[in-house]
Amino acid sequence: MILTRRELIAGSAAATGLLYAPAVLGQGKPKVVVIGGGAGGGTAARYLAKDSQGALDVTLVEADPVYTTCFFSNLHIGGLRDFDSLRHGYDKMAAGGVTVVNDRATAVDREARTVTLAGGQVLAYDRLVLSPGIDFVEDSVPGWSLDAAEIMPHAYKAGPQTELLKRMIQAMPQGGTFAMVAPPNPYRCPPGPYERASMVAHLLKQTNPTAKIIILDAKEKFSKQALFEEGWGKYYDGMIEWINPEFGGADVAVRPDSMEVVVEGVAQKVDCCNVIPAQTAGRIAAIAGLTDESGWAPVHPDSMKSRIDGNAWVLGDSSAQGDMPKSAFSANSQAKVAAMAIRAELTGSRLFPAKYSNTCWSLLAPEDGVKLGASYEPNDDRIASVESFISDTGEDAALRRRTYEESLGWYAGITADIFG
Amino acid sequence: MRRCAIPAALSIAVASGAFPVAASEIGDPLRGAELFAEECSACHRIGPGATDATGPRLNGIFGRRAGSLAGFNYSRAMLRMGNDGLRWTLPTLDAYIENPKALVSGTRMAYRGLADAQARGDLMAYLRAYSDRPQDIPEAEPTARASAPVLPGWILALQGDPGFGEYLSAECTTCHQRDGSDQGIPSIAGWPEQDFVVAMHAYRQKLRPHPVMQMMAGRLSEEEIAALAAYFATLE
């Protein structure tokens, strides 16, 4: 008998199915609960529902019925994008077979495999996916707390904070000072604070050209540094001052009541202060007991499965996976690997090797975009960077415009990929 | 020896993986530390607070332009190479350590070279731990070597299989929209298979200039390109 290629494949798929006989022997369809409807959770939920074609019961838990993307929110601050363009609902995801529950998860019982919501509902799961983004480390900037975020916004979770920060910038007096306290590593979107400084400078240049921007930074260097510094010199000459640890950037406190920043013990009055604190995994990851002493959730590099619980996955910013930066692109990439691995366990579908990639675009000024990217592969202990690239300084305006247009295309693409 | 993580457990690969596809480590950083002490430390310092000595400090060497540390008195040859664009990466450092004069003819580094490729890998793994971490500086030099695609036979048998292509396409659809919309990033839906294959190979050979696509195509096998072409051809 001569087997055709198709028959051979069908045979091996069947064998695989036996090997991966659904671990869940209860009644009904296997249940996957996804917590967090952003780039990681949204993508995972949508791909699980789409690719399992009804074989899985997929529930997405997201507090906000309309999600505001943190990526591209700097462009709103710069006046280059309206707020509504950052907002995405879950109608298409629901139409695609995902049960969307607009509530907040407050507890996870990993023994009983249940998630409890603020509204009292209890969801049972066979597999749990956590993609809750970031939370802030209390007291990482002395004098600042979450309560102070109404006076000194972080604007590092997009939404009302983004609009608040923009209003405060617009209300600055002529020649006033905007201060940013930049976060220590690791944090969401490595180039993000510096793109934000560029966009704040662009906004101020129109209406308040003698204003100053100071960035207080505990880091000795940052992502895309040469590109940002070149751009700042070109577009906002003398407006932006980066204060690194050598000049006191690592010894910073704030006084929200008097709108002061204190650098090496010396207080300075400012007119707007953006405090981006140190970060940790979204709270529910710690509540679920899936984080380690680093504050992040360790995962297996070939699947994004938790190293602590074989029935749980952690995606995106909250995960500790190795070399990938915390970005929407990374979370989206990780979610597809996770969705495939979960389907393989629950339905016996085919398992392909994990591949990961990331690209980060940043805008220096209108139509002047730059990017970096890398590809990654899992090895024994981490997701490892195996190739990287970055835009060059001195590129011509046509290439920079093209990079900007490409970033717009990416935004349209990834939001369609996440939300349907 | 801070930050030289020892792979935690071999069980990881067993736990969820079924594939030999994995990035390979540059080398063994512990062995590299011993080599550094034997071969390099007479002239070079590395680690917290390291300063220049007979040779420049090696913190942050990966990604650094040759001859670019302010305050260090480099040879004219090294400065010239830096101005010509030499940057320290895995391949360039490897060549330099193997035979310094092969890369920088007039270098002052009086070192006979390290012939053993494994030893060079170990040494570079040690050095790499003191340069930028990609998690924080994503454009930093890689920390591992990419695997040659080693795929199980049953995947190879799926040549041109749109189902395999659909899985692989998840990586494309982060940017290229499935419905064919074209907003700053071109549509690839409904492309003739041949055109798709030819274009991907042109990126692989870096004949087409786009760095994201060069990177994406660069790690696709022939079979994967065929599967993707088959899938995208089916989209209207």
Image (cartoon, rainbow, N blue to C red):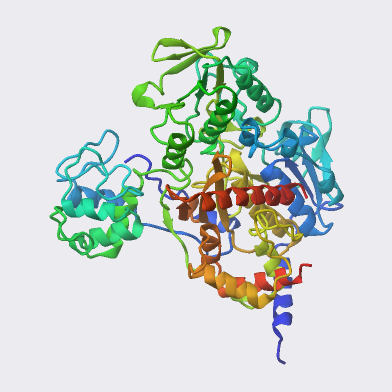
Q: Position of residue A89 (x, y in %)?
A: 80, 40
Q: Indicate the position of residue A45 as horizontal and vertical percent values.
A: 75, 48
Residue at left offset 55%, top offset 28%: A205
Count of marks, rendered view? 0
Front residue (pair A419, B43): A419
* Residue A413 seen in this snapshot: yes
Looking at the picture, tell me which residue is in the foreground, A265 or A376.
A265
Residue A277 placement, left or right of A218: right
Residue found at the far top of this picture? A258
Question: Does residue B152 show up?
Answer: no
Q: Is residue B189 left or right of residue A326?
A: right
Query: What is the quadrant of residue A230 in the picture?
Result: top left
Residue A168 locus on image (x, y percent): 63, 19
Q: Which of A318 and A345 lies nearest the eye of the viewer?
A: A318
What residue is at 55 percent from the left and 19 percent from the top?
Answer: A273
Give the x, y percent position of residue B168: 65, 64
Report whether A368 appears left or right of A125: left
On-image quarter of the C terminus of chain B: bottom right
Between A318 and A71, which is closer to the camera in this rendering? A71
The quadrant holding residue A160 is top right
